[in-house]
Image (tube, rainbow, N blue to C red):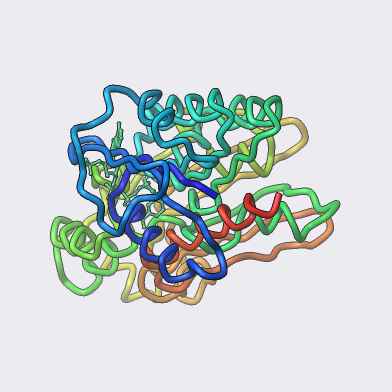
Amino acid sequence: MKLAIIGYGNVGRALARLLRQKRREFPFTITGIHTLRHGTAVDPAGLAEDPPMRPRSASIEEFLDAARAQIAVELTTLDPTSGQPAIAHIRAAFARGMHVVTANKGPIAHAFADLREEAARRSLGFRFESAVMDGAPVFNLWRYTMPGVKVLGFTGALNSTSKVVIQTMEQGGSFDEGLARARSMGITEADGAYDIEGWDSAAKTAALANVLMDARTTPQQVSTRGIARLTPARVQSLATKGKTVRLISRGRRTGSKLSLRVRAEVLDRCDILASTPGTSNIILFHTDLMGTFGTVSIDPQVEQTAYGVFSDLADLATV
Ligand SMILES: NC(=O)c1ccc[n+]([C@@H]2O[C@H](COP(=O)([O-])OP(=O)(O)OC[C@H]3O[C@@H](n4cnc5c(N)ncnc54)[C@H](OP(=O)(O)O)[C@@H]3O)[C@@H](O)[C@H]2O)c1
């Protein structure tokens, strides 16, 4: 199948490497790459590795028409406050009869119900496994392995940047040193404030609630407080008592009421939400038939995000 990639940064390049690695078993062809500042490359017969970039297509519509692909892969920068321009990119792809795969949580957090309905109306696939926990199964777990199980709520430690900042302060560093460390590890969003102020976690919380609990919500409706007010003194004092802090996303349905919140919570060090190593993420699902169970991703890298996109592509190729 032919792919048009919108956004060719860390994830886009890791995906291209993975597609080359698995080319024999999964014969995808990249026919277009479109970026913001680095131009556009298009060849409906298939692009070479690291193709020369030409001047940027005048519009997303012009790019998609030229690439003549079956699947658009949306990998542009997150804007957690609006989900744009990714939502417009996805709509343009649907309008051309293209399936869509994205790792961008913005559209799932802001417009999931509308996009799902638009895809269904046109009999197109719409997949987003990497949007919340890189390649670890979250949405596809529910799509394929939990028939009849209802999600009553979820609890997650889903933001790696805040974790690195807290761990740096526990080790005697400053808040800013922690943020710089997270940035050097390549795990912060393009705007690090999104991680610190809780926007990234709020977007993940809204995305989970929209997909798993049909919430039709947005990040603005998630009650959110980030870690900006945490100090090294506070974190170190908690550490002497065997405690630590994690930025926790919680969703819970009680009757007809849905509560969604993000908070820097004080946890025992041995709490399952706090005890995963390094930049690991964890999510627990609270359900009617399966009790509480979860998914853990140990030190995910960009290759795992690319794998989540790849798994969606492989899935669509078999539909
Ligand atoms: N990095 C991860 O591990 C990870 C994990 C989970 C989810 N995600 C999500 O995956 C997406 C991509 O992440 P990334 O790390 O690859 O980001 P990135 O390295 O910053 O790359 C973003 C790409 O999007 C392009 N872009 C931005 N605005 C655009 C526009 N309006 N039209 C066309 N292209 C545009 C940029 O163009 P230029 O190259 O010209 O600047 C760049 O190529 C984000 O939504 C992110 O939240 C990332």
Give the quarter the ligand 1 occupies: top left
User: Please, is residue 38 above or below residue 239 in the view?
Assistant: above
Q: Find residue 196 and report its horizontal and vertical position in percent.
A: 29, 47
As drawn, 180 above or below 128: below
Q: Nearer the viewer, residue 202 or 171?
A: 202
Instruction: Pinpoint residue 166: horizontal percent, then vertical percent.
Output: 29, 63
Numbered label tally = 0
Task: Tell me what residue is drawn at x 41 percent, y 50 percent.
Answer: 30
Q: Is residue 214 left or right of residue 192?
A: right
Residue 77 is at least partly visible in this image: no
Could you tell me which residue is drawn at 30 percent across and 42 percent down? 194
Q: Judge from the rendering whether residue 57 lies leftward or rightward of residue 316; answer left or right.
A: left
Residue 226 or residue 231, whichever sits in front? 226
Tell me the residue at 52%/44% (across/down): 101
Give the x, y percent position of residue 97: 59, 29
Residue 30, can we see it? yes
**Drawn side of residue 42 relative to residue 29, left or right:** left
Q: Residue drawn 57% across and 53% down?
A: 312
| Of residues 163 and 3, the one drawn nearer to the viewer in this rendering | 3
Q: Which of 141/199 is in front?
A: 141
Q: Residue furthest front?
A: 45
Position of residue 44 measured from the top left corner of the image (x, y, whole percent): 41, 41
Choose top left, top right, bottom left or bottom right for residue 251: top right
